[in-house]
Image (cartoon, coloured by chain):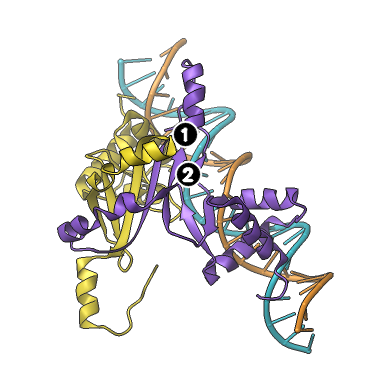
Chain colours: A yellow, B purple, C orange, D cyan
Amino acid sequence: MGRRARIAGAIVELMEQRGLHAWTLDELHASLASGGEGADFSSVFRSVARLESLGSLRRVALDDGKSRFELDGEHHDHMICDRCGAVAPVPCRVVDAGLGEVEAATGFRVLDHRLVLSGVCPECLAVESEHPEGRAVRA
Amino acid sequence: MGRRARIAGAIVELMEQRGLHAWTLDELHASLASGGEGADFSSVFRSVARLESLGSLRRVALDDGKSRFELDGEHHDHMICDRCGAVAPVPCRVVDAGLGEVEAATGFRVLDHRLVLSGVCPECLAVESEHPEGRAVRA
DNA sequence: CTCGATGCAAAGGCTTTGCAGAAAC
DNA sequence: GTTTCTGCAAAGCCTTTGCATCGAG
């Protein structure tokens, strides 16, 4: 797929510009459209699938019911703010330590992992300490 | 919902009998049927939703595209087989250890986490060692 | 011409909802 | 009668796929 791959190229460019972000197909589709790189949804889907199989993208699941994709940089996990949805990367060192024990106990061979921490980001913590009354709790 | 709730009762009973397992709606639907407690899929769905909102069940996301539910007992994480979909529980001790470090580094307050380990279960490992040639790799 | 990339339309898979009937109180 | 639980059918939401076309080599 080296020739044009206009859409795939635009997707990667979008992702590089915005930095750390887990994109849904919808977001990609919309961003391409507003960026003048209009594309059919299925083409976005296929481009993303291609990029994923090539290892350029990684599928991440933050469990809002949609698949998300991000550039395949250093593997990291995610921390998501229950209040504002902010996402921060977390080094996966958090998990790696205990894997040997798990393999021994379960007999599984662990090939991958996905960790999503949730809680409150620094900004929302600050807001809450100023307005200790009613805050909207999402989760 | 204290009265009959035949289906909800059967669901809880099923779950208690089988012990740790993250059930899909489909599995519940099928198990109820084969157990003589036939129920419409939507009824299973609504019963589960009710039990979840009551706090009896917890929704877990293993990202195989289906919602799963389990009794709200001790919190644990999950390990899922890439080959056959088998799920095994994992003590969340694996994660807890590193949380302090994460909080310090990110400024987030961590309230919860979700960890899904993936790999190959003992059964599939055995099958693969017997037939080392063509096996379907999903991830 | 050949092959990958696209667009368009339709199908799939799983989840959720609308509505009416049945059961418990 | 009122409220809760069920079944049946249909809609929804997102993801995938089939097929014909277009464009580069």
Q: Residue at left 26%, top 43%?
A: A97
Residue at 48%, 22% (x, y): give it: B128
Q: Which residue is tagged 1?
A: B121
Do pointers 1 and 2 mark residues of a single chain?
yes
Specify the amino acid type for callout 2: Ala
The answer to whether B88 is drawn above or below residue C16 in the figure is above
Chain where mark 2 sits = B
A28 lies above or below C24: above
- The answer for which chain carries disc 1 is B
Residue, disc 2: B88
Observer-nearest of C14 and B103: B103
Q: Is residue A63 left or right of residue A94?
A: right
Asked whether residue B116 is in view, the answer is yes
Q: Is the Cβ of the residue at disc 1 closer than 8 Å to that at disc 2? A: yes
Let me know if residue A33 appears in the view.
Answer: no
Q: Earlier in the sequence, mark 1 or mark 2?
A: 2
Q: Is residue B98 left or right of residue C7?
A: left
Under circle 1, the secondary element is loop
Spatial CA span between label 1 and label 2: 9 Å
Report the residue at 47% width, 19% height from top. B129
Position of the C terminus of chain A, as image quadrant, is bottom left
Give the quarter of the image for residue A13.
Answer: top left
Residue A110 at x, y percent in the picture: 37, 36
Query: Could you say where residue A112 lies in the image, as x and y percent from the top left?
Result: 35, 38
